[in-house]
Image: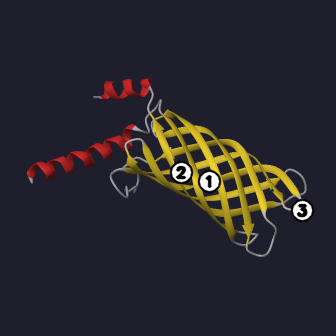
């Protein structure tokens, strides 16, 4: 029984250490949001089905920069036609460290983060107008490490798009669920070994 308890303590400690190791300088993050729900601020609520792949490189511990692509279909509940959405641009993430000004980790093997993005995006409405413009968003998220290199993520985000022509601001609050894979590089492994 003592061996089983000791093994459990070691496993939890290992997962907590992994959460810190995966967001070190030199690592890569690759992932995607798979499920998106939005709450329209000026267009009404609705649903979205989208794939949002993203990739980022950790330029410092807890700080990643990279890019994203967004391809999706959405339908607003007020009877509007189906809309195809697209975007491409840059993103940044900052992961909060345990003990930072009131930051309380939900579990020992997870991390809170803030994500922001800016790029070019647009929409094409079925039998209607299309627009292309500035795509931007910002919001908090949480990554729960289900394995040492895979995080299950939830992200609440204010997402906006404004057209370059006469199109006004279109914005909504989205809730995204997806995953990220954290890929350590040899440089990151060398830094981790130096710390030990």
Of all residues shown, which one is farthest toward the bottom?
78
| Circle 1: element type | strand
The quarter of the image holding the N terminus is: bottom left
| Circle 2: element type | strand
Mark 3, Cα crowd under 10 Å, few <14 / some 14-19 / many 20+, is few
Residue indicated by mark 3: 128
* Disc assigned to residue 114: 2
Placement of 5 over or under 170, stated as above or below: above
189 or 99: nearer the viewer: 189
Q: CA distance from mark 2 to mark 1?
A: 7 Å
Residue indicated by mark 1: 138
Placement of 131 over or under 67, stated as above or below: below
The picture quadrant where one finds residue 20 is top left
The picture quadrant where one finds residue 90 is top right
Residue for point 90% across, 52% down: 165
Placement of 48 over or under 58, stated as above or below: below
Q: Is residue 173 left or right of residue 108?
A: right
Q: Are marks 2 and 1 in contact (CB under 8 Å)?
A: yes
Q: Is residue 96 left or right of residue 55?
A: left
Q: CA distance from mark 3 to mark 2?
A: 35 Å
| Circle 3: element type | loop
Q: Is residue 50 left or right of residue 178?
A: right
Q: Is residue 65 left or right of residue 128?
A: left
Q: How is the image coloured?
A: secondary structure
Residue for point 89% across, 62% down: 128
Placement of 112 over or under 173, stated as above or below: above
Q: Of marks 1 and 3, which one's residue comes earlier in the chain?
A: 3
Q: Residue 123, position in %: x, y?
A: 80, 55
Instruction: Tell us which disc is closer to us: 1 or 3.
Output: 3
Q: Residue 9, position in %: x, y?
A: 20, 49
Residue for point 51% across, 55% down: 141
Q: Are marks 1 and 3 in contact (CB under 8 Å)?
A: no
């Amino acid at each position: 029984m003592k061996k089983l308890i000791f093994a459990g303590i070691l496993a939890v400690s290992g997962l907590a250490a992994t959460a810190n190791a995966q967001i070190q300088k030199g690592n890569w993050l690759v992932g995607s949001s798979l499920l998106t729900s939005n709450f329209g601020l000026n267009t009404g609520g609705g649903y979205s089905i989208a794939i949002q792949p993203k990739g980022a490189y950790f330029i410092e511990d807890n700080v990643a920069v990279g890019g994203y692509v967004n391809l999706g279909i959405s339908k607003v509940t007020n009877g509007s036609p189906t809309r195809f959405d697209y975007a491409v641009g840059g993103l940044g993430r900052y992961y909060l460290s345990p003990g930072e000004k009131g930051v309380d980790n939900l579990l020992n093997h997870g991390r809170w983060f803030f994500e922001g993005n800016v790029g070019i995006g647009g929409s094409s409405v079925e039998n209607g107008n299309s627009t292309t413009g500035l795509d931007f968003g910002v919001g908090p998220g949480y990554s729960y490490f289900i394995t040492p290199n895979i995080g299950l993520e939830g992200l609440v985000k204010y997402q906006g798009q404004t057209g370059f022509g006469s199109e006004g601001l279109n914005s909504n609050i989205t809730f995204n669920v997806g995953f990220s894979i954290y890929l350590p590089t040899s440089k990151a492994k060398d830094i981790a070994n130096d710390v030990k």
